[in-house]
Image (spheres, rainbow, N blue to C red):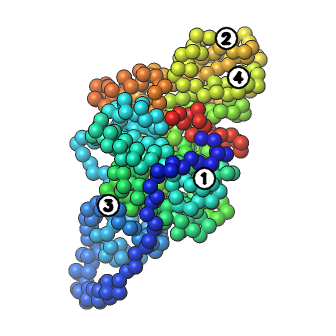
Amino acid sequence: MNPNDEPYTPEDLIRPVPYQPKKQPLWQTSLVSLTWLLLSGISFYLGLQALKADPKPASAQAGTEQVVLQNTALKADLAPTEGAWESWKKWWNSNNTSSESDGTVSSSEPESEDDPAFRASTWFSDYEAMKRTVHLYNEIHPFIYGFKGRETNNGDLYSLWGSAQKHARVAELKSLNPKVKIIPTIFRWENKNEKISENIGLNGRNDIRDKHIQNILYEVDTYGFDGIDIDYEGMSCEKKEKFEEFIVILSKEIHKRGKLLSVAVHPKTAAKKSGMKACKGLKEKINMDFAENWRGPMTHDYAFLAKHADRVKVMAYELHPRKQGNPGPGPQAPNVWIRNIITYAKERVPAKKLYMAIPTYGYDWALNCNAKIKAVYWSDALKRQQLGVTKQPTNITQVLADNKNSDSWTNLSKFSWVHQGKTYEDPSIWYKSEGCDRVAFFMNRKAFEEKMTLLRSYDIGGFSFWQLLSDNDPGINDYLELLVTNKLPPVPKAKKLPEVPNPDVKQAPPEENQEEAKNNLDLVKK
C-alpha cells in the first residue's frame, strides 16, 4: 500500500457496534459501601488473611457484551507502587479481573502438554498460500485490518476481507488445521500523512481510544478469532505512554475473553552506553539502553509490553532497507544481528512470549550506477542466478577483494566497514544488468534453516514470517514439516559469543520520503 493513497474500505464490512459505557446502579454502590463497613469490623487476623489472599481469576468471558473502560482502573495498573487501599480494591475486584500479584495481566493461554516448545507463526495476505500450508503453523496472522482516517483517527477499522469472507475463511482454516490459532493483525505505519494518535487516546481523546478498543473486541467476538495482533509502527516518541495505556486496557478485555494479545515491536540491540532521553509530552524520560535511536523503537518498551501481551514479536528485518544511503547493500536479517536482538530482548521478555520475525524477501542494489533498488523473491532470485555468480555464505569483504571491478562499486565500498569481520549465511547474486553491476540478497531454505537453528538454540517462544507467500522457496515448507512433526535433531544451547571486531550496524531510521516495507505493493502481495 502506498502511504499517500487513501486506505481501501470494503463495502461489506459490518460496522462495529457503537461504544456505550455502562452506568453503575445505585443499589450496587450502596451494597459495596455497606459490605465495607461490615468487613471493617472483622478481627485484624481475618482482615490480614483477606489481604494476603490470592483468589483465582474469573473464568473467561466470551460474547459481545459492552465493555466499561475506566481510567481510574488504568491508573492503578500503571502505578509502580500501591498503598493498602489500592491493594484492597484490587482484592475486592479480583473476581472481575485477571491480575497477577504484581499487578500485571496474566497470559490467557493455559499450559498444555500439546503446547509446542517452539511455535511457528506467520503474517500473510496470500490466502491461497495460507490454505496450502496452514498445517505447518501453530499461529497465523491474517494481515487484513487497518485504520480509517489518516492524520486523525475516529476509532474505526477497515478490513481487506468482507464479513462473509471472514466467517468462511476462519471456518476453512480451522477445518484444515483445528489446532491453529487465528490472530489477525491491525497495522498502521506512521508517517506525515498517516498518524496513530486518537486511537490510542492522544490529544485527550480517550473516548476515541475506547471506541477503537470496542471495535477491536467486536471483530474478535463476531468472527471467532483467537486474539488480536497489534502492529502499530513508526510512532513518534510522545505516543509511548498513551500506547502503553491502550495496551493495558486492551489486554484486560482480550484476556477476559480467554483470547491472546500479540504485539509486534521494532528491533533493538543493546547500547554501549545507556542514558535518559526526554521527549516532549511524556511524563517520564525514555531509558535509551538500546542503540536504535529513531522514533519507532522509542515507543516500544519491551519489558512493559511483555507484562501485558502474550506474544512479543520482534520484527527482525530491514537492517539494510531499500535506499542508497547508509548502510547500503546487505542482508535483511543476518544471524550476527539477530543474535544481538535476542540478547537484548531476552533480558526483558519472558522466553516463552518472545518471537523473532524474519523476512522471506531481500533487495537488489545497483553497485556503480544510480538505478532503482528492487525487492527480490524466490522466483526473482532464480532468474538472476542465470546472469551472474551466487555466493552462500556471503563474505562481502572477500568479494570486494576478489573482483577487479569493485573499485567502481561506490554504492557498496563506501560502507565496507559495515561488513568487515562478518560472513553472512544469506545468499547473494553478483551480476550485470543494463551496463550496471548489481547485487541481490534473497532468502532460501539453507539461510532459513541456519536462522531457525539459531532461534531454537535460545529457547524462545517461536518465530514469525514476514510474510508467507506462494513465491517462497518451497524447501522452507519441507523444513517446517520436519519442525512441526518434531523430526528435527536437537540443537545445542546458545553460548555467549565474543563481540565481533567492529560494531554491528544498527537498524537505520527510515528516510522521510522512503516507503516502509509493509506499505509497498510489491511486498504486500495479494
Q: From mark 3 to mark 2, how far is it between C-alphas? A: 65 Å
Relative to the observer, which residue lies in front, 9 or 109? 9
Q: Which mark is residue 402?
A: 2
Q: Looking at the image, is mark 4 or mark 3 nearer the viewer?
A: 3
Q: From mark 1 to mark 4, how far is it between C-alphas? A: 31 Å
Q: Quadrant of residue 450?
A: top left
Residue drawn at x 59%, y 36% is 521
Q: Residues within 10 Å of mark 4 (few under 14, many from 20)?
A: many
Residue bearing mark 1? 235
Q: Is residue 347 above or below residue 445?
A: below
Q: Residue furthest front?
A: 11
In the image, is 73 to the left or to the right of 233?
Answer: left
Determine whether label 4 and label 3 are within 8 Å by CB: no
Whether residue 263 is visible: no
Q: From mark 1 to mark 2, how far is it between C-alphas? A: 43 Å
Relative to the observer, which residue lies in front, 178 or 89? 178
Relative to the observer, which residue lies in front, 21 or 286? 21
Residue 22 location (% of width, % of height)? 40, 75
Element type at mark 2: helix
Q: Which mark is residue 366?
A: 4
Residue drawn at x 48%, y 72% is 71
Q: Is residue 64 above or below residue 21?
A: above
Q: Kindly identify the amino acid type of the residue bearing the numbered disc 1.
A: Met
Residue 69 location (% of width, % of height)? 44, 69
Residue 436 location (% of width, % of height)? 73, 16
